[in-house]
Image: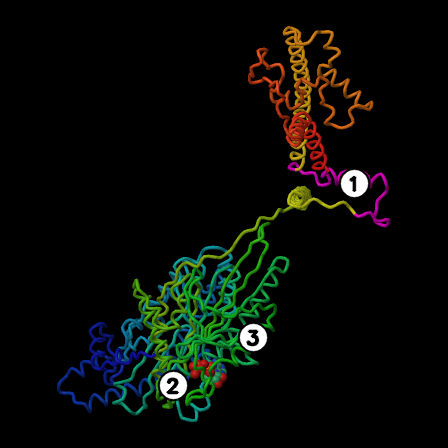
Amino acid sequence: MPVSTRSQISVSRDETISADHRSRPPPPPPSNQEPPLHPAHGSALLRNPHHGLKEKMRALTLFYEQHKQQLASSKDQSARSESRVLATHHPSVELIDFNHKKREEEQEGEEKQKKEADGGVDLAMKENIVMLSQPKATTNPVVFPRTNAKENQEVDGCDRITAYSCPKKSSATTTAIRKLSMGGSGAQSEGRFARSKAGGELGAISENGQSGSRILVFVRLRPMAKKEKEAGSRCCVKIVNRKEVYLTEFASETDYLRLKRLRGRHFCFDASFPDPTTQQEVYATTTADLVEGVLQGRNGSVFCYGATGAGKTYTMLGTVENPGVMVLAIKDLFSKIRQRSYDGNHSVQLSYLEVYNETVRDLLSPGRPLVLREDKQGIVAAGLTQYRAYSTDEVMALLQQGNQNRTTEPTRVNETSSRSHAILQVVAEYRVKESGNVVSRVGKLSLIDLAGSERALATDQRTQRSIEGANINRSLLALSSCINALVEGKKHIPYRNSKLTQLLKDSLGGSCNTVMIANISPSNLSFGETQNTLHWADRAKEIKTKACNANEEVIQVPESETEQAKLLLELHKENSDLRQQLVRHQQKLLTVQAQSLAANSLPVPPAISSPLLSPPRSTQRKVKRSILTGNCFSTPESKKKSTTDDAVVQELKKTVKNLEAEIARLKKEHMLQIKQKDDFIRELITKNGLLPLEEVGEKRVVTRATLRKGARAATEGELKSPSHRFVSPVPTAKKRSFWDITTGNSPSVLAANGRKTRSHVAAETPPAPSMLLQLAYQCFWFVFLLGPHIANHFLSAGLRSSET
Ligand SMILES: Nc1ncnc2c1ncn2[C@@H]1O[C@H](COP(=O)(O)OP(=O)(O)OP(=O)(O)O)[C@@H](O)[C@H]1O
């Protein structure tokens, strides 16, 4: 992290000495007569006002010489230990190795315990038991300046290192608690055992998958670079027991005054990797468990953190010969999925993005910067390409493609310095058969290679590089703020301060198993950066993550074959039922469609007879008739319509019949009336004696009968014209015409006294109406009498035509 912690640890040596003196009991007096070397004596000397600086220096020099002799004598013992290989010429490192014999004894004790214990017991747990049983640190005569009190309280089993007087957290106790709490499922214990084995019994403990787990922090030390060697830099980092990291500031052996300001610090992590550690070892210890968790449906994150050139990209990506965590994790993921997936039912999707100068870019399909959005799944980059990969080779090709698109620039520190934070996300979804059921699991693994924290001077003064550096530092500062807030348990975590922290939100504070790998350089020239890195890594250890629940779904599957066959039969039956239903519905639908079509269609014209098209005679007739009757597409509506029409016709026919009967009746009545009138006329004539009855016969009374007679006569030759038809045989008598009858000019109304009555016909024959008028009257009567017949005729004719 870019935040320096130097100010916290620069304490004067004198203060430290006095503090140590206060806190420790005086040691037994020395056997020889040499000047007192113990700090108590030293402090006594120092407190003596008569002792000058020269004496102090002499005492210290003597002590230093003696210490060197002791070291020389212990070299034989340390030659047998593994740390002999790592021994450097740095005095502090030599001091660390001073206690090798003791550590060897401890290791022997560990092995003894291992043999005694059951086979299934976690090696890491045993290691912790041993650590707990270790004796408390004894008083050490070597006094070094006190550093961060929080970090280095005690170093178990390392007397000399305790002499740093850097109060260290009781890491052994913490570790033991963690390890003891893991005595849960056998599977987990097995997993941890396997991991311990793979990690070379590093004792790294995973609490993944358990509620309230914390971020696991690992440290990796890279080998000294050629450039650094050439620059005469020396190793300032010592890794002990594959857990503890000792950081010492260099000082010249003869520069006694400089000793005052020497800084030494001690840290303890879940595991620490010295420079010869292989990539495979690092992967097995840090990430293998996370991959396992992903396969169980849990999310996992691994991020590499450190100064520029510290080996982050090497750890994450590696080289062709030594592939890194990303490559190994993907290979492992694919091979494990293949082994387990039920019926090969699995999918792996990946995305690869970078955060460069506070912009998010898609590395697999570069284009416009992406926008970060928060949804139910957490923070997502909108529009980020998700590639589905079916093999490791495909993933490798995509990874290579992405890395080519990644922003890297040469800096003074690193020739291929990553100028961006890169995040590879792999989503694995697969089905596995477990206790008769099929379980579908989805897990996400995020592999993050952060850009290196750096000092402006360490890289370049050029504008672009310095801008990049400023942005990198800004985002890493935001990361450190988030770590601080999380450690302190604050409610508000400032994730929004940078794109990087937004993207890491899930990994840091979400439901996720998270691993941090802090990369450090061994060079004393990078002391400040290494110290910063270790400080923040140590702080990150305290971050508690939320319980990581498995994202899985159980699909019920019958166990026995008989049950399966049963299920298959049931499914077949259901399937055929559904098919039948479908056919029925289709039929119904067709009928409805046809009916609606018929209802909406116009009457079809009669088919044009064609010898080729015409059907057989009988059919043709039927068809023709049906077309004519409109029954070819008989719908309920059309049927109803035709029925209504029939009823109307019947009604009309009835009416016609009734009318005809009425006409006949009226005719009869009319004839009767005429007859009555004739009789009445005759009677009147007879009464009045106007004509003797005998003469009556002679003088031709115009009656209907006579008319008929006359008509007959006319037909015989007398009345040849219509005007003659009504010629009265009596010349004096008024000729009674049809007009007379109808207009009441009847002779019957002629008064006997000669007076004209209304119906009286004057003696002088009134002028007869004109022929035209008579004709009109005749026509009227004609129409009156024959009208109903004619109407009836037309009506039935119309009905017939409407029927057709
Ligand atoms: N464990 C290691 N073993 C061998 N070589 C290493 C190791 N770690 C790092 N290196 C080498 O150190 C150099 C710098 O490493 P790397 O590029 O990984 O640093 P970095 O932290 O990613 O730097 P930056 O932040 O600038 O990108 C590389 O040449 C790399 O090969």
Q: Nearer the viewer, mark 2 or mark 1?
A: 1
Residue 617 horizontal side relative to residue 515, left or right:
right
| Label whose residue precedes the other's in the sequence (1 or 3) | 3
Q: Nearer the viewer, mark 2 or mark 3?
A: 3
The image shows residue 713 at horizontal and vertical percentages of: 80, 20
| SS at badge 3 | helix
The image shows residue 582 at horizontal and vertical percentages of: 66, 44
State the residue position of label 1: 623
Q: Amino acid at mark 2?
A: Ala
Start and end of the magenta stretch? 608-637
Mark pair 2, 3: CA separation: 55 Å
Which residue is nearer to you in this view: 779 or 370? Answer: 779
Q: Amino acid at mark 3?
A: Leu
Q: Amino acid at mark 1?
A: Val
The image shows residue 315 at horizontal and vertical percentages of: 48, 77
Judge whether 344 appears above or below 632 on screen. below
Residue 715 horizontal side relative to residue 668, left or right:
right
Residue 329 horizontal side relative to residue 238, left or right:
right
**What mark, if any, has residue 398 been given in the picture?**
3
Magenta region includes residue 646: no
Image quadrant occupied by the C terminus:
top right
Mark pair 2, 1: CA separation: 126 Å
| SS at badge 2 | helix
